[in-house]
Image: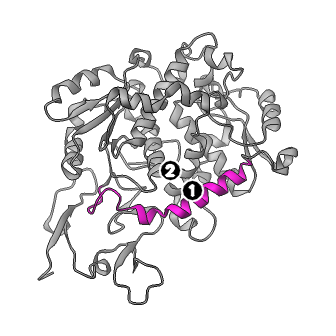
């Protein structure tokens, strides 16, 4: 507009093979009363202070699963979310007080206090023991957690506490056996519900599923392909209008509550001090390992050089030169040394050779043995990388990967806004499988 000073330029190219045309350049401008809101907002232009008659300042109010300065980023379609007016631009859209209310409702539904009468009657709880992966004991950790979060969705929708009676492959190790929690999520996490007695009863009754297709990674029937419950949103009203990402962020954060023993084993604060994890910092997830030769990602793994343009974008836009590098590949760590003149790369040191295999991780029968500590070390390193990505200010991620999705969801739940992100391979997906790109 004539007489108004442009504040930034946003360029959006949707699709894999697109060329930039002049009509796709959108120029933001800002006037004293923010009147541009009505012209650029893809949501609803509302008063910044609800109920104010004069409406001195307007803001863009987004609909379900849309975020950004103009609500133009759809969480289920966008590969990139780069707020133009700062990293916390989505804070108002996220609605922190409403999110905290949702978390309270989940806690209440799960009877975490242990005082609810529903824990006295098995018919009043929602029990599931089926799991993905070989033998129904789980696949990769993040995909397993996302799968189990679907059960929590269904339980929340019918107002019953969810009890998981199944097994977690990462907890089949010597450490968990010594804690009398072999194969149990509770080896590392707080109980999912306050119904301890019922949980113990159903846990002891669990039997592994029998696959008619032999070595099938998903032998539990309809839940392998039934994904409808991942579309469930919050209760009717404002919560429902926030969409699926908002709901799933609250659910996975609930499941990811570490128990005190695990917090002590990890000591995240000490790790941050030891490796120099300081804000502001870019979190970068480079997924290699079994993903390089299995599933839809086969043959599409890139070296760190392929991530540099995205890292550069984040660095220049938000003035950040420190990078936390989360990867399962030691060669990526070595490659980062070539770029030390550009960025300060920080990594957490652990034995990455245990991840070297041409098999899917759930088919690594050498890992999940009750007299071995390998799966325990794998669990801790996975948690540490995920939590440090969560705590990063911005993310360069693989949203086809469940670990990247989990980090983004946990980051939003902790920060109470969706942080800036660039995905290398596709948009965020609301369930445990891969969504179409």
The number of callouts visible is 2
Q: Which label number is shown at residue 212?
A: none
Q: Quadrant of the rendered structure where residue 247 is?
A: bottom right
Callout 2: SS? loop
- Tell me residue 384's x, y (percent): 45, 30
Q: In this view of the protein, which residue sits in the foreground, 246 or 104?
A: 104
The residue pinned by badge 2 equals 430
Q: In this view of the protein, which residue sits in the foreground, 68 or 55?
A: 55
User: Is residue 87 magenta-colored?
Assistant: yes
Q: Is residue 413 visible?
A: yes
Instruction: Name the quadrant of the N terminus.
Output: bottom left
User: Is residue 168 magenta-colored?
Assistant: no
- Tell me residue 10's x, y (percent): 21, 62
Q: Quadrant of the rendered structure where residue 258 is?
A: top right
First-in-chain label (2 vs 1): 1
Asked if residue 136 lies left or right of residue 379, the reply is right
Q: Residue at x 54, y 16 (%)?
A: 367
Asked if residue 318 lies left or right of residue 53, the reply is left
The residue pinned by badge 1 equals 231
- Compared with 344, 35 (above or below) is below
Helix, strand or loop: magenta stretch: helix
Residue farthest to the top, as pictured: 371
Q: Residue at x 14, y 74 (%)?
A: 5
Q: Residue at x 65, y 29 (%)?
A: 136
Q: Quadrant of the rendered structure where residue 146 is?
A: top right
Give the residues drawn in magenta, as a range. Answer: 82-111
Asked if residue 230 lies left or right of residue 282, the reply is right
- Tell me residue 60's x, y (percent): 37, 73
Asked if residue 220 lies left or right of residue 31, the reply is right
Q: Residue at x 55, y 27 (%)?
A: 264
- Tell me residue 349's x, y (percent): 37, 21
CA neighbours of label 1 inside 10 A, class few (<14), some (14 to 19), many (20+): some
């Amino acid at each position: 507009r004539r007489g108004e000073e442009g504040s930034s330029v946003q360029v959006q190219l949707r699709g894999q093979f697109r060329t930039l045309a002049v009509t796709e350049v959108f120029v933001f401008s800002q006037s004293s009363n923010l009147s541009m809101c009505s012209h650029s907002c893809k949501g609803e232009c509302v008063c910044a202070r609800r109920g104010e008659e004069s409406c001195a300042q307007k803001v863009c109010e987004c609909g379900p699963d849309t975020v950004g300065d103009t609500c133009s980023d759809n969480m289920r379609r966008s590969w990139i979310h780069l707020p133009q007016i700062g990293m916390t631009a989505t804070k108002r859209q996220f609605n922190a007080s409403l999110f905290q209310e949702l978390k309270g409702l989940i806690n209440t539904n799960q009877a975490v206090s242990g005082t609810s009468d529903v824990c006295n009657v098995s018919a009043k709880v929602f029990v599931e023991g089926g799991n993905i992966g070989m033998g129904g004991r789980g696949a990769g950790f993040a995909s397993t957690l996302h799968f189990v979060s679907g059960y929590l969705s269904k339980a929340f929708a019918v107002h019953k506490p969810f009890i998981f009676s199944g097994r977690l492959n990462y907890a089949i190790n010597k450490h968990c056996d010594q804690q009398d929690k072999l194969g149990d999520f509770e080896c590392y996490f707080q109980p999912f519900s306050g119904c301890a007695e019922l949980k113990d009863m159903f846990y002891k009754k669990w039997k592994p599923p029998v696959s008619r297709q032999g070595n099938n990674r998903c032998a539990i029937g309809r839940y392998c392909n039934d994904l409808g419950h991942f579309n469930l949103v919050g209760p009717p009203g404002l919560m429902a209008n926030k969409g699926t990402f908002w709901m799933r962020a609250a659910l996975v954060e609930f499941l990811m509550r570490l128990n005190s023993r695990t917090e002590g084993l990890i000591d995240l604060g000490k790790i941050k001090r030891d490796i120099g994890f300081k804000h502001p910092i870019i979190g970068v997830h480079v997924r290699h390992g079994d993903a390089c030769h299995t599933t839809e990602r086969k043959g599409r793994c890139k070296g760190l050089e392929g991530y540099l343009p995205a890292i550069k974008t984040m660095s220049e836009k938000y003035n950040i030169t420190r990078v936390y590098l989360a990867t399962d590949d030691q060669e990526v760590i070595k490659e980062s040394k070539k770029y030390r003149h550009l960025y300060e790369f920080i990594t957490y040191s652990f034995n990455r050779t245990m991840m070297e295999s041409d098999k899917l991780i759930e088919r690594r029968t050498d890992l999940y043995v009750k007299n071995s500590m390998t799966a325990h070390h794998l669990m801790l390193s996975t948690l540490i990388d995920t939590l440090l990505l969560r705590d990063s200010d911005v993310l360069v991620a693989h949203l086809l990967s469940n670990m990247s999705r989990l980090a983004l969801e946990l980051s939003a739940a902790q920060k109470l806004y969706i942080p800036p992100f660039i995905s290398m391979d596709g948009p965020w997906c609301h369930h445990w499988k891969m969504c179409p790109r």
